[in-house]
Image (tube, rainbow, N blue to C red):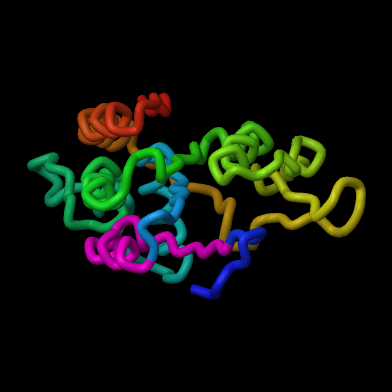
């Protein structure tokens, strides 16, 4: 990480950090006072999005419904599939709390980031001890993508919108698959809510 002046904050983004067992210890050795920001979303939606992203890179392959279960008769969720495993947030958070205090970790709701980006960014700025500079005036909603875009500064410059790999249309998923996944994630979600002290409202 580059050195920061007293008046600066150095930020780095790597999604795989949160789910990699060795990272918390290594990061703690580098900077025990670091502040961590984790964006989470409904694990069912996250799994479907993960699958959609991967499926877009190939012409054929098994469906989401087929990938979700170990076999078609048992109905057991295949937790070895990374798209499913990553959504068990409480398991990964346990690794981090062995090294960091919960006051050092801020969780951003992926759903609220779409619905109310300014509100989520206000909480991020508060967490980092920054003046609230980014407000609702810096966002507008892109109807095509279904996501907000960020204006570089109020009333000027081209807005920054998510790239073509984001906002893809999700495939049709069997309602029974959705129900089974929600049942699977429910106890893990409840444990995560308890650990974080916040109910994200995932059914």
**In terms of secondary structure, what is the magenta stretch mainly?**
helix
Per the image, is 164 magenta? no
Residue 126 in sight:
yes
Question: Residue 40 vs residue 61: left or right?
Answer: right
- Please provide percent x and percent y for residue 149: 72, 48
Quadrant of the image containing the C terminus: top left
**Residue reaching furthest bottom?**
2
Question: Residue 189 vs residue 170: left or right?
Answer: left
In magenta, the rendered stretch is 10-30
**Residue reaching furthest front?**
6
- Please provide percent x and percent y for residue 118: 68, 36
**Residue reaching furthest left?**
74
- Please provide percent x and percent y for residue 109: 49, 37
Location of residue 52 by image quarter: bottom left
152 above or below 179?
below
Question: Residue 71 vs residue 184: left or right?
Answer: left
Foreground residue among 178 and 61: 178
Residue 85 in sight:
no
Foreground residue among 202 and 99: 99
**Residue at the image position 49 percent from the left and 73 percent from the top:** 1
Location of residue 81 by image quarter: bottom left
**Residue at the image position 27 percent from the left and 62 percent from the top:** 20
Foreground residue among 62 and 30: 30
């Amino acid at each position: 990480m580059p050195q920061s002046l007293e008046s600066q904050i150095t930020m780095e983004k790597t999604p795989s950090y949160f789910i990699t067992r060795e990272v918390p210890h290594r990061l703690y050795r580098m900077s025990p006072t670091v502040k961590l920001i984790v964006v989470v979303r409904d694990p069912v939606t996250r799994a479907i999005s993960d699958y959609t992203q991967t499926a877009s890179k190939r012409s054929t392959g098994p469906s989401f419904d087929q990938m979700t279960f170990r076999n078609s008769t048992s109905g057991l969720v295949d937790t070895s599939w990374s798209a499913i495993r990553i959504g068990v947030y409480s398991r990964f958070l346990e690794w981090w709390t062995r090294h960091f205090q919960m006051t050092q970790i801020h969780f951003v709701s992926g759903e609220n980031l779409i619905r109310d980006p300014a509100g989520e960014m206000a909480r991020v700025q508060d967490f980092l001890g920054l003046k609230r500079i980014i407000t609702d005036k810096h966002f507008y909603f892109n109807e095509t993508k279904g996501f907000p875009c960020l204006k570089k500064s109020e009333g000027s410059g081209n807005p920054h919108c998510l790239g073509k790999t984001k906002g893809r249309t999700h495939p049709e998923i069997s309602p029974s698959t959705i129900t089974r996944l929600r049942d699977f994630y429910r106890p893990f979600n409840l444990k995560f809510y308890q650990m974080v002290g916040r109910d994200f409202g995932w059914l």
